Image: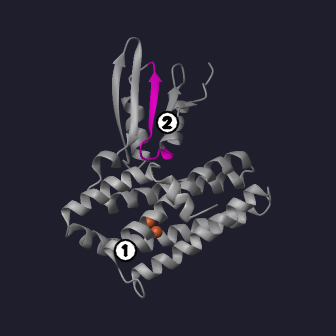
Amino acid sequence: MTVSAPLEGENTIFLDLRGVADASAGPQIFAHAQRLGLGQRILVEIDRDPHTLLRAASFQMRETISWSAEEKDRGWQVEIRPRVEVDARDVVDLLVWDHYRLDRQFSEVLAAANAGRMEEAEAIFREYWIGLRRHVYMENHVLAPALGGGMEQGPLADMLFEHDSIVEQSRLVDETFREQDHALLPAICAVLSGSLAKHENREENTLFPLWQAANNRDRTRAAEFLERTRALLAGAEDQTVKQMFPE
Ligand SMILES: [Fe+2]
Ligand SMILES: [Fe+2]
């Protein structure tokens, strides 16, 4: 029995799990689901009822995915999407979910670098790097001016300061990959992974409650932010994002 490699369309990952035992199919679904971005989906072909596998994957993903499964002739077809596409109440929900995703991606970069799988580490880093810049662009340039939080002093000022440092550290990782200075990678990735986790935690506990309250005061604007952030995190404003945060 062979395990087929997934085919990747721009926003669809095709996974053929026909003939693949559960012991291997489950981890494959989980591995791809972890890297699922907004606007993306996984299409799975499988030759048996997939519900138990999907429930296990969803549990591992802290219920951040949603799926639909349909019985087709001689098998099942499953579509998996980020649950937040349907569920997010506001822009803050989306950003919290995106923190979780960026964290996961970066710890995968670190794990691959530690294991000496540099090509894989670099491929995941590229996804993380554009994702991080989209996220920081949204926070710095769209939400901060509108929702406040203390531009000079306060949680917003801390956030802006930490973003500069995280973007700078990510740029260093980028350069290190480009220069193929592989011996340095595990150490600088470990430092960045720590900064990222600390920053996200602080942001969620200090700034986001203020933003959520400010955001709730204007329903029309809140709906616009939600829609714009969904599109932006899926790549809709990449030209501007890359101008603001060049590589
Ligand atoms: Fe954030
Ligand atoms: Fe942030």
Secondary structure, mark 1, is helix
- Residue displayed at 53% across by 25% down: 21
* Residue 89 to residue 162: above or below: above
Amino acid residing under circle 1: Pro
Q: How dense is the environment of label 1, judged by Cα within 10 Å: few (below 14), some, or many (20 and up)?
A: few
Rendered-image quadrant of the N terminus: top right
Which residue is denoted by mark 2 in the rendering? Answer: 29
Cα distance between the residues tagged 1 and 2: 39 Å
Q: Earlier in the sequence, mark 1 or mark 2?
A: 2
Q: Which residues are magenta?
A: 34-47
- Asked whether the viewer can see residue 152, the reply is yes
* Residue that label 1 marks: 145
> Which quarter of the picture shows residue 40?
top left
**123 is within the stretch colored magenta:** no
Is residue 117 in view?
A: no
Q: How many marks?
A: 2
The residue type indicated by label 2 comes to Ile
- Residue 153 at x, y percent in the picture: 42, 88
Q: Which dot marks residue 206?
A: none
